[in-house]
Image (cartoon, rainbow, N blue to C red):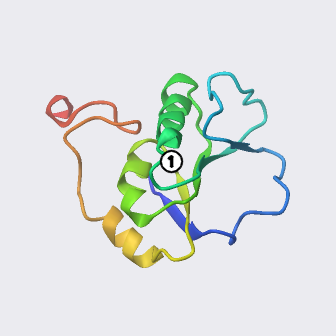
Amino acid sequence: MKLNLYHAGQQKPTEMPAGVLELSNDADPLEVSLEGVNTIRLIFPKFTDGRAFSQAVMLRKRRDFKGDLCATGDVLIDQLIQIARTGFTSAELRADQDIEHGERLLNHFKGFYQGDAINATPAFARA
């Protein structure tokens, strides 16, 4: 799955359009209604708070959410590989982050041994 990158403010409207749900990092993704939702924005209030990673995995694996999961807030390029592996499809980077460098980081590894939210099967079992 390709991770789409953009800077904060480039795509966030003043009001959430229909089909977009923004979840705070203390919300339980197992209890929210996903009816009519095609995009979920998960918030990283600061770089050191990773609860949105857990929310993304729960939405992909336990809720079978197929739409866009967007990482927003204090999102740094250092987090991009984990963001992609936990099921996000887009990331709204903090304004001081270099999108081109982030894209290079995402292409640095050709694959992973462990399973993740996208490919649950570990490498040894894929052959």
* Labels in figure, total: 1
Write down the quadrant of residue 108 in the picture. Answer: bottom left
Relative to 120, residue 69 above or below? below
**Percent position of residue 57, x then y:** 47, 34
Relative to 121, residue 48 above or below? below
Q: Is residue 112 left or right of residue 81?
A: left
**Percent position of residue 107, x then y:** 31, 64
Relative to 62, residue 42 above or below? below
Which residue is at 79% across, 63% downward? Answer: 13
Write down the quadrant of residue 95 in the picture. Answer: bottom right
What residue type is disc 1 on? Phe
Pointer 1: what residue?
88
| Element assignment for label 1 | loop
- Crowding near the residue tagged with mark 1, few <14, some 14–19, many ≥20 C-alpha atoms within 10 Å: many
Which residue is at 45% across, 56% downward? Answer: 2
Relative to 49, residue 2 above or below? below
**Percent position of residue 60, x then y:** 52, 33
